């Protein structure tokens, strides 16, 4: 009996393994399809170059959009986010039709399962983390949308898409060349956006800055009576506040009352900018992971295509 149960369990595990291999086969076919559409299987260098420029421009554009619309995105309720996720799911399903018909079922089940779990988690665990996740999915859907536009064969659309992509690339090279680095957003995301907290801090007067620094660090050696505060000392106070800005969110009652008395409504605005900067930074990091994977694949494809084109038949 034990042997029979063991064999039965072994067959179930084996069947699960075959299912996993089917999913792997589906991903392999999707990747081959992408290589075929973007570089003709590593034979068309200009085509993969145009796709790489499009991905760089799209990442820069979406990063700009997210930085300007974080407050608007934060105002979304759970119902709006769930509806938006279904639209993203629909965009993913559109890609399935470019894959062989026998793989539609496995791919659909896989992505419906992933998004189903995600939607349930969105309903149960609404927290600040859901906003970067939502932005990540918007970016993912944008990649799929522009990938489909890239496949369009209408010459007018192709011309407009390339014109916009090359225009964005020129702007990126002039203003934010670090965006071309696929790992910049992961390891130095604070350099890719303008901190709203630092911007609000610069709008405060000298006494408010000194008071805030004294609250965050009791041994801060400047006092309100010091009227002749140098520029370097003021900058050191600002640097202290920026380095300890998370502590503003967890002040004790005494320091909280002092901060509200000194800053008034500006204290609440500072707290909002801290949360906004955190959301923006997490959004940049999450989208940068996907961007780095795509760009590395593009660089690999560029290198392989260039090597194939350099071979001269004898």
Image (tube, rainbow, N blue to C red):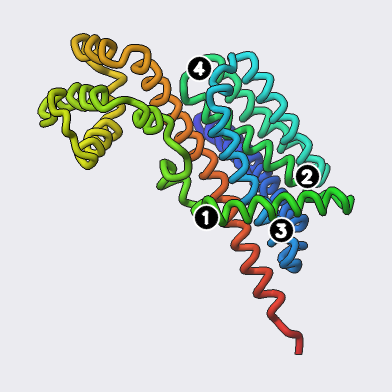
Of the numbered discs 3 and 1, the one sitting upstream in the chain is 3
- To which residue does mark 1 refer? 177
Q: Are marks 3 and 1 in contact (CB under 8 Å)?
A: no
- To which residue does mark 3 refer? 50
Of the numbered discs 4 and 2, the one sitting upstream in the chain is 4
Q: Quadrant of residue 266?
A: top left
CA separation, marks 4 and 2?
A: 32 Å
CA separation, marks 3 and 4?
A: 39 Å
From what the image shows, is residue 138 above or below residue 253? below
Instruction: Tell me which residue sits at (57%, 47%) in the image.
Output: 291
- Going by the image, does 282 lie left or right of 63? left
- To which residue does mark 4 refer? 126
CA separation, marks 1 and 2?
A: 27 Å
| x and y percentages locating residue 205 in the rendered image | 30, 25
Helix, strand or loop at label 3? It is helix
Mark 1 neighbour class, 10 Å CA radius: few under 14, some 14 to 19, many 20 or more? few
Of the numbered discs 3 and 2, the one sitting upstream in the chain is 3
Which mark's residue is nearer the viewer, 3 or 4? 3
Which mark's residue is nearer the viewer, 1 or 2? 1
Of the numbered discs 3 and 4, the one sitting upstream in the chain is 3
- To which residue does mark 2 refer? 148
Q: Are marks 3 and 2 in contact (CB under 8 Å)?
A: no
């Amino acid at each position: 009996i034990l042997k029979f149960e063991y064999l039965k369990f072994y067959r179930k595990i084996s069947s699960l393994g075959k299912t996993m291999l089917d999913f792997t086969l589906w991903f392999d076919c999707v990747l081959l399809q992408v290589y075929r559409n973007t570089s003709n299987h590593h034979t068309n260098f200009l085509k993969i170059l145009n796709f790489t420029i499009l991905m760089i421009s799209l990442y820069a554009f979406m990063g700009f959009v997210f930085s300007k619309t974080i407050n608007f995105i934060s105002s979304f309720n759970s119902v709006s986010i769930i509806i938006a996720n279904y639209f993203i799911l629909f965009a993913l399903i559109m890609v399935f039709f470019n894959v062989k018909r026998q793989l539609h079922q496995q791919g659909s089940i896989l992505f419906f399962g992933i998004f189903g779990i995600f939607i349930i988690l969105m309903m149960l665990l609404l927290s600040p983390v859901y906003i970067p996740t939502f932005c990540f999915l918007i970016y993912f859907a944008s990649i799929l949308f522009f990938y489909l536009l890239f496949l369009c064969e209408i010459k007018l659309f192709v011309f407009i898409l390339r014109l916009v992509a090359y225009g964005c690339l020129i702007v990126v090279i002039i203003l934010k060349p670090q965006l071309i680095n696929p790992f910049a957003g992961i390891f130095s995301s604070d350099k890719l956006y303008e901190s709203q907290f630092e911007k609000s801090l610069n709008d405060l007067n000298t006494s408010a800055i000194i008071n805030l620094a004294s609250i965050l660090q009791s041994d801060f050696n400047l006092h309100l009576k010091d009227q002749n505060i140098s520029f370097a000392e003021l900058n050191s106070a600002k640097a202290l506040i920026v380095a300890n800005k998370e502590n503003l969110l967890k002040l004790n009652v005494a320091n909280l009352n002092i901060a509200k008395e000194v800053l008034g409504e500006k204290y609440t605005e500072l707290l909002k900018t801290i949360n906004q900067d955190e959301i923006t930074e997490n959004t940049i990091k999450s989208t940068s992971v996907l961007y780095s994977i795509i760009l590395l694949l593009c660089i690999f494809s560029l290198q392989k295509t260039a090597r194939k084109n350099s071979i001269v038949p004898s």
